[in-house]
Image (cartoon, rainbow, N blue to C red):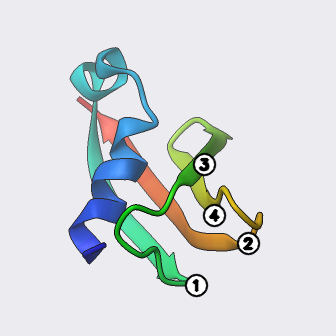
Amino acid sequence: VTNTVYVDWALDCFAPQEHLQRRLEWLQINYISEVKPGGEVQMFAGGDGRVRYVRGVHAHNGMTAFEAALGWGEG
């Protein structure tokens, strides 16, 4: 998949209400292993406050595909 897909996946981990109340100030993504077309990725999100973290894991082997940190500011 292309690098913009990873951004979409990371942003999709957060409820629409969060997007309405806050704005994304910065984003860092570390690409660790390729996700090929048709590959399944499980998403895990956490953190609180201004910084949230997302990790995408290959569903078939549990290897990390990417990690992201997202910095949110007040809307």
Q: How many marks?
A: 4
- State left or right for residue 7 relative to residue 47: left
Q: Are marks 2 and 1 in contact (CB under 8 Å)?
A: yes
Work out which quarter of the rendered image holds the N terminus and state it: bottom left
- Amino acid type, mark 4: His
Residue named by callout 4: 58
Residue 53 visible in this rendered orientation of the protein: no
Disc with the residue nearer the chain's start (3 vs 1): 1
Determine the secondary structure under disc 4.
strand
Marks 3 and 4 in Cβ contact (< 8 Å): yes
Query: In this picture, is 73 found above or below 58?
Result: above
Tell whether label 4 touches label 2 (CB within 8 Å). yes
Residue 32 badge: 1
Q: Quadrant of residue 21?
A: top left
Residue 11 seen: yes
Q: Secondary structure at mark 2?
A: loop
Foreground: disc 3 or disc 1: 3
Q: Amino acid at mark 1?
A: Ile
Q: CA distance from mark 2 to mark 1?
A: 9 Å
Estimate the x, y position of residue 67 in percent, counting from the top left. Answer: 57, 68
Q: Is residue 2 toward the left or the right of residue 36 in the image?
A: left
Instruction: Work out how far the residue at label 3 is from the one at label 1, CA to CA, in angstroms.
Output: 14 Å
Earlier-in-chain disc, 3 versus 4: 3
